[in-house]
Image (cartoon, rainbow, N blue to C red):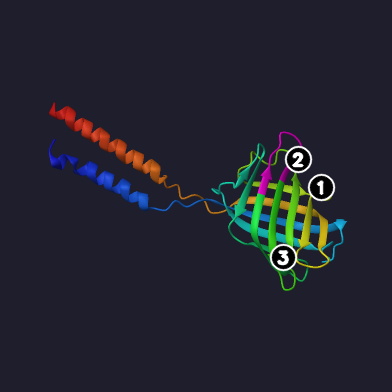
């Protein structure tokens, strides 16, 4: 087989290998939780959050791998910050070191739990929101699109303020909605490993064909 007969194949292999350098864009999910806090279910609401409205938003890579799993739950570490707005005065907090746990049990309500630290002028509460979703809202424990209405007293938000002499601990009801919805779509570019396998397979076919023609 003459060298010029390999030219189209060599060009194809070059293009396939060059595609390995193309980044694969991951899909993202937008997390939105909004509603009203209260009433106080446990402890003393020293921050006076009962009765006010709130929103919590964040962006999650849908390809994120869980950091911990059980038979019916998966916990994810959210790398970015959360944005939290409270009340009519639109007090804005930043949530950091957030974790998200999705639980899809064999029976009973599904559960979304999100925990994070928050920063503000003169207090730094640790916050955990536990939201009970209608059964069947989740389809497995992977990051996914869904919408649900939640209500107190099943759904709640707890906060503590560490580092103070008289530790503040309170649990408030949550009534509102929680949504995880698709953001940027995937680019559709094949995975690098797939491209490499295609390239190797094509080369093997060409070499075998050349041997058959010479025999």
Q: From which residue to which does the magenta span run?
A: 101-111
Place residue 195 in its image quadrant.
top left
Tell me which label, 2 or 1, sits earlier in the chain.
2
Label 2: few (<14), some or many (≥20) within 10 Å?
Answer: some
Instruction: Pinpoint residue 167: horizontal percent, then vertical percent.
Output: 81, 63
Q: Contact (CB < 8 A) between labels 2 and 1?
A: yes
User: Who's the residue at 53% across and 54% down the image?
Assistant: 184
| SS for dot 2 | loop
User: Who's the residue at 82% across and 56% down the image?
Assistant: 171
Tell me which label, 3 or 1, sits earlier in the chain.
3
Instruction: Pinpoint residue 190: horizontal percent, then vertical percent.
Output: 41, 45
Q: Which mark is residue 85?
A: 3
Q: Contact (CB < 8 A) between labels 3 and 1?
A: no
Residue 23 belongs to magenta span: no
- Image quarter of the C terminus: top left
Residue linked to disc 2:
109
Tell me which label, 3 or 2, sits earlier in the chain.
3
Measured in 3D between alpha carbons, the distance from the residue under mark 3 to the one under mark 1, in whole angstroms, is: 22 Å
| SS for dot 3 | strand
Measured in 3D between alpha carbons, the distance from the residue under mark 2 to the one under mark 1, in whole angstroms, is: 10 Å
Residue linked to disc 1:
154
> Farthest residue toward the bottom?
121
Place residue 134 in its image quadrant.
top right
| SS for dot 1 | loop
Label 1: few (<14), some or many (≥20) within 10 Å?
Answer: few
């Amino acid at each position: 087989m003459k060298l010029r007969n390999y030219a189209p194949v060599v060009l194809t292999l070059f293009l396939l290998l060059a595609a390995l350098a193309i980044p694969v864009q991951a899909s993202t999910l937008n997390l939105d939780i909004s509603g009203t806090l209260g009433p106080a279910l446990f402890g003393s609401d020293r921050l006076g959050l009962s009765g006010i409205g709130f929103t919590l938003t964040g962006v999650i890579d849908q390809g994120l791998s869980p950091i911990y799993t059980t038979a019916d739950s998966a916990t994810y570490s959210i790398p970015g910050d959360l944005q939290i707005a409270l009340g009519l005065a639109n007090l804005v907090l930043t949530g950091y070191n957030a974790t998200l746990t999705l639980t899809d049990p064999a029976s009973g309500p599904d559960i979304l739990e999100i925990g994070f630290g928050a920063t503000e002028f003169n207090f730094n509460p640790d916050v955990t929101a536990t939201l009970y979703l209608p059964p069947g809202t989740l389809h497995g424990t992977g990051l996914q699109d869904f919408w649900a209405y939640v209500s107190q007293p099943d759904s709640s938000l707890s906060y503590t303020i560490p580092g103070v002499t008289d530790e503040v601990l309170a649990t408030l009801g949550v009534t509102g909605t929680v949504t995880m919805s698709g953001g940027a779509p995937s680019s559709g570019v094949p995975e690098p490993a797939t491209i490499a396998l295609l390239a190797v397979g094509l080369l093997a076919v060409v070499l075998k064909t050349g041997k058959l023609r010479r025999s």
